[in-house]
Amino acid sequence: MDWVIQTHDLSKTYGSVAALQSLSLSVPPHSIFGFLGPNGAGKSTTIRLLLGLARPTSGTASVFGLDSVHNSEEIRTRVGYLAQDPRYYDDMTARETLRFTLHFFFKGPKPKLEERIEETLELVGLADKADRPIKGFSGGERQRLGIAQAQVNYPDLLILDEPAASLDPMGRRDVLEVMERLRRHTTIFYSTHILSDVQRVSDTVAILNQGRLIARAPIDQLLTGDGSAVYSLVVKGEGASTRERLLQQPWVKTIAVHPVNGTTELEVSTTDEKIAAECLLRTALEDPATVVSEFSRHKYNLEEVFLQLVEGGSSDGNSK
Amino acid sequence: MATANDILQPVTVRGWRRGFSNLLDHERHQLWGTRRWLVQMLLWIVLLNGMLAFVGITISLNKDQFSAADAADFAPGAMYTIFMQLFFQIAAVCSAVGAVIVAQGAIIQERQMGTAAWILSKPASRTAFVLAKLAAYSLSLLVLALLVPTLVLYGEIYLWSGRVPPPAGMLPALGILFVSVFFYLTLTIMLGTFFNTRGAVLGISLGFMFAGSLIPSFLPKLAAFFPWTLGQIALALAPGSSPSAPLPATAFIPVAASLLWSLLFIVLAIWRFRREEF
């Protein structure tokens, strides 16, 4: 596969601080790739290395197969970038900012360039504020302008560093909608710590902690935890006999017990999804005293997976 | 959307010139597209021509009280010389100090504000970033700090002496002043790529400039390799401002040395900025 981004043992050290350690990563084309991690995990450092704004201490990074150190200018010709805390010239208007940006990529014809600017302003909902100086813009408007200036050249790769971090819920929703709209045309690599956003729009995620990659997987795969299927069975009473019965099955790995208001939730982790789907409920009901009030496939949310990985600090086997 | 890029003409320039014209347009617009040029122009006129106007007006108002000897000192021919000397002495100092003040934040401010990182995330070369600033600042200082005040000087001299300096004679003198301005401009921009605070840039540039008022007295040979005497050379070249004989060829060593220093500063600025991490 022709990866859009590929890094190999990419490391960056500032003095004695290792900001990034041996990052090996591949981003497929036309994906929305979520780059997750707590503050200081090394997400922005990685992005700066990809764009040639910083030099790696060791290892390599390539974008579109081009080396990030030696072909940085060529890479930037095909990339749109939104910084975490984007700064522009405050006395310029949104239209002037986009015109200035677009002229790094295209020289004409002028009417078509203006058309592109207008179209981009419409896309991010800034058409009515296009001729106002940026210094009067709210945080949300600045962020929209940030996406506009990143997108105005119709890049093959859009790199967004915390695109929704400073936005209110409506602003975040708008940004995610824009990202979903752009998915058809470009690859999006974005860093964030807002997990619900990632779960909503990403196809693949990588989790970084303390400069190290601790997981990388398609989001569906990551949400299944360690690869085993987990079912939730809610029974009346303490459910001790049901638990004992289930534990005797060779395809049951572990059972976690959570008592809830006179009922008990049994979180059953299994080794064989197919057998579990067919037999789990039947096995539980073999005991006539068992009353099942709920049965469903347990789905982790990304927050659970993220916390488990980051606080656990180790790879879960889904990586790579 | 990807096909929509086909109807646009891509920038084909590659290498160090990539982004230069866009950056230069931007820098020019920052000055000439706003009122900044007007403010700067008025400041330069006040600084460089204000003293001359003050002298001229004072003499005109007190003409009746002069003795015969004093009147000869302020005759039109003498006024011409006084104005030329005053102008070149003031311009030599003020234009150099002005260059340092105007350019002190050229690089640092962009780095601190984060706009440099933004621009360099686009296909623009770091060399183009530095050179666009240098070109724009050079042009603005040449026009606003030297050419416009010179035009005002022509008006002042004509008003009080009834004659004007020949332009062909003025150009070499202004050229020497510009070498001095360019030296301090390149020095300031180069320091801006090495330091993170304006204080350091300002302190070193102005410190070097004022060292020039002491060092030539102790080490006259050293002064020949720096721009400290360029103001005197410009004055000596200015038509009718100095009665002395034509300058010896060795007098131009500081000119050549200053240009070489400027070239070195530009190379160092580009070298350092290309290593900058954002």
Image (cartoon, rainbow, N blue to C red):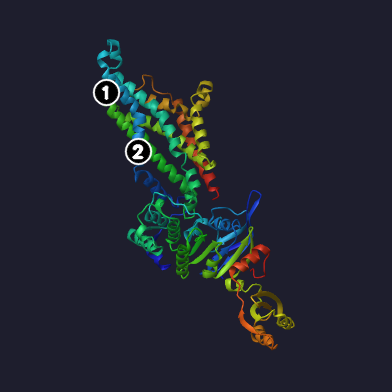
Task: Find residue B109 and report its horizontal and vertical position in percent.
Answer: 48, 44
Residue tagged 1: B160
Image vertical order of residue B87 relative to residue A226, above or below? above
Residue type indicated by callout 1: Trp
Dot 2 or dot 1: first in sequence order is 2
Image vertical order of residue B210 relative to residue A272, above or below? above
Task: Find residue B5 and report its horizontal and vertical position in percent.
Answer: 40, 64
- What is the chain letter for disc 1? B
Residue B39 bears which disc, if any? 2
SS under mark 2? helix
Residue type indicated by callout 2: Val
Looking at the rendered structure, whether the residues under marks 2 and 1 are on a common chain is answered as: yes
Task: Find residue A239 and report its horizontal and vertical position in percent.
Answer: 70, 80
Image vertical order of residue A310 relative to residue B214, above or below? below
Q: Residues under labels 2 and 1: Cα distance?
A: 27 Å
- What is the chain letter for disc 2? B
Quadrant assignment for the N terminus of chain A: bottom right
* A166 on left or right of A253: left
Mark 2–mark 1 CB contact (< 8 Å): no
